[in-house]
């Protein structure tokens, strides 16, 4: 099934709006600060929505319903860690970044340790985010191409090129405002899917939930202590907290948005708003997969063929022959017949294709066009945020302090370069590392865990020094890769990878620091304990009050 002319028109109109935003803000770029930090005068509501949209990509939009559809609701426990990560970010790290007047989070590491740590951290960030941006383009493009019949390369090029062009034209302001537009469309799409499923299942929401519950798809908590359990409560809390802090503290994509707010108070309000918004949105997105499961459970004649049929056996109660054929295909690695329709017995759907398949086959026009636009929009939101932050990090993280101030032209050229690299990765290099949710966590954990460990080491240890931080980072990377190898070979849960990498970085960094000189009083104001002595930029701009007697 392909998009109708009306659906196509809706999708094209949406893309034109995004280009229009980029062209509009192109006229406002008078300095490098305006291009990279939007002059630090963006309203806190827009900052909060943008921070959320930048992390809520097409990967989430496709992967979240797939996760709950095939594996149940256990991953939702990870969202609860935001209640811990948000206060830590607001109270500890955002004041650092604003008081030090930095362009990137990694400039803090230079001040706290030395120049080498800023370069190492920038390299980690660039590696992780280029891969993540490539995955953000690759996964939705593959899913949309498979169910619409559009060429995969076309979906990749449209997504990558569109995000690169409007980000290059409009800079940070274009990124923030298009993030906001895309977030609104994405939320509307989730609500439509949720309401449609409830209305179509006889008995509504209670019936759809009960159908999923009886098949074991609504178990939130698994308290097994085994690290081999795919999603346990302990892995979700500890690993989820590390991944949440990586995105909120050690990720220039988020930090760059904190720095666009006018003051620390405004930034804090933006982060609390983000927390207030993310909980209902995450619940809706993940539980839409549960509702789709309930829909197909109530409508067995409409159930398509899935590669992961083994994870949803009850959907095939009325068609055991099809179930047996799908299991046999999976065990024998039979390739799909690409001449057949998606969801047919010889071309079963991949797990991450469930949402676009459902949208195209069950929702009325023009909703499919709008929801495909929402998927592409969410993808472009994270890609635009990524390449803008990559350009900022490369521009500020690798230049010598004696070099001239970078120009807007240099920033635009780097934005184009990173956009092209991410698109090429999506087109020629990336392959799936399991489900989208698992792939995202692996990329986030292996390269993000050591970064988070570095920031925690700098903020909470007065004794930590540069040699210890370097050895800690190397150890974190080694332990993270070892944990990933254990995930592949013995089934260690992917949620433990980031926790292992973070703790290894912190503990080894602290121990090695004991063998080198104390950093001294120089770093007093660069730790959590002494940062309160530094003035905020907005406080410095206030006139000094006149004291004394009035004559």
Image: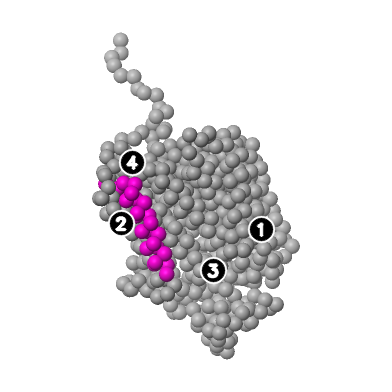
Cα–Cα gap, marks 2 and 3: 32 Å
Cα–Cα gap, marks 2 and 1: 43 Å
The residue that mark 1 highlights is 157
Mark 1 and mark 4 lie on one chain; the one further toward the N terminus is 1
Mark 2 or 1, closer to the camera: 2
- Kindly check if marks 2 and 4 are in contact, taking CB atoms under 8 A apart as contact: no
Location of the N terminus (image quadrant): bottom right
Dot 4 falls on a residue whose secondary structure is: helix
Cα–Cα gap, marks 2 and 4: 20 Å
Q: Is residue 390 visible?
A: yes
Mark linked to residue 526: 4
Main structural element of the magenta stretch: helix, strand or loop? helix
Mark 2 and mark 3 lie on one chain; the one further toward the N terminus is 3
Task: Report the side of 504 relative to 537 (left or right).
Answer: left
Mark 2 and mark 4 lie on one chain; the one further toward the N terminus is 2
* Residue 182 drawn above or below residue 538: below
Mark linked to residue 508: 2
Q: Nearer the viewer, residue 399 or 375?
A: 399
Q: Position of residue 540 (x, y in %)?
A: 39, 29
Mark 1 and mark 3 lie on one chain; the one further toward the N terminus is 1
Which segment did they paint magenta?
463-485
């Amino acid at each position: 099934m392909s998009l109708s002319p009306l659906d196509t028109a809706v999708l094209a109109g949406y893309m034109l709006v995004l280009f229009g935003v980029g062209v509009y803000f192109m006229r406002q770029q008078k300095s490098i600060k305006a291009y990279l930090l939007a002059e630090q005068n963006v309203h806190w509501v827009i900052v909060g929505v943008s921070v959320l949209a930048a992390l809520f990509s097409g990967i989430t939009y496709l992967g979240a319903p797939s996760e709950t559809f095939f594996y149940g609701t256990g991953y939702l426990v990870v969202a609860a860690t935001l209640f811990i990560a948000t206060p830590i970010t607001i109270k500890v790290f955002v004041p650092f970044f604003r008081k030090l007047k930095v362009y990137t989070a990694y400039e803090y590491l230079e001040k706290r340790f030395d120049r080498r740590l800023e370069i190492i951290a920038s390299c980690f960030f660039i590696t992780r985010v280029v891969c993540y941006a490539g995955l953000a383009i690759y996964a939705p493009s593959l899913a949309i191409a498979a169910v619409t019949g559009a060429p995969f390369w076309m979906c990749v090029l449209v997504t990558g090129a569109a995000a690169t062009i409007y980000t290059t034209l409009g800079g940070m302001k274009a990124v923030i405002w298009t993030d906001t537009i895309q977030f609104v469309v994405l939320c509307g799409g989730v609500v439509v899917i949720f309401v449609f499923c409830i209305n179509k299942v006889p008995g509504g929401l209670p019936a759809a939930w009960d159908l999923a519950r009886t098949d074991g798809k609504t178990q939130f908590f698994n308290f097994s202590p085994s690290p081999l359990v795919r999603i346990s409560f302990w892995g979700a809390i500890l690993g989820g907290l590390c991944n949440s802090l990586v995105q909120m503290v050690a990720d220039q994509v988020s930090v760059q948005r904190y720095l666009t707010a006018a003051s620390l108070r405004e930034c804090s309000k933006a982060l609390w708003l983000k927390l207030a918004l993310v909980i209902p949105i995450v619940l809706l997105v993940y539980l839409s997969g549960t509702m789709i499961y309930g829909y197909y459970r109530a409508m067995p004649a409409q159930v398509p063929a899935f590669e992961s049929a083994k994870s949803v056996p009850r959907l095939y109660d009325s068609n055991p022959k099809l179930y047996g054929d799908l299991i046999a295909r999976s065990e024998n690695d039979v390739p799909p017949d690409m001449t057949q329709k998606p969801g047919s017995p010889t071309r079963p759907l991949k797990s991450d294709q469930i949402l676009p398949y459902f949208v195209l086959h069950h929702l009325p026009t023009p909703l499919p066009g709008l929801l495909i636009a929402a998927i592409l929009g969410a993808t472009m939101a994270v890609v635009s945020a990524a390449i803008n932050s990559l350009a900022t990090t490369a521009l500020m993280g690798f230049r010598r302090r004696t070099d001239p101030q970078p120009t807007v032209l240099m920033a635009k050229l780097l934005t184009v370069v990173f956009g092209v690299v991410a698109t090429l990765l999506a087109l020629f290099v990336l392959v799936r590392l399991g489900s989208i949710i698992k792939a995202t966590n692996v990329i986030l954990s292996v390269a993000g865990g050591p970064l988070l460990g570095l920031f925690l080491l700098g903020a909470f240890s007065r004794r930590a020094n540069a040699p210890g931080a370097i050895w800690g980072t190397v150890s974190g990377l080694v332990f993270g890769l070892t944990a990933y190898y254990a995930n592949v070979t013995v089934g260690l849960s992917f949620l433990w990878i980031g926790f292992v990498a973070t703790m290894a970085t912190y503990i080894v960094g602290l121990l090695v620091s004991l063998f080198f000189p104390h950093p001294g009083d120089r770093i007093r104001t660069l730790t959590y304990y002494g940062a309160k002595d530094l003035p905020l930029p907005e406080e410095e701009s206030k006139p000094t009050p006149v004291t004394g007697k009035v004559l």
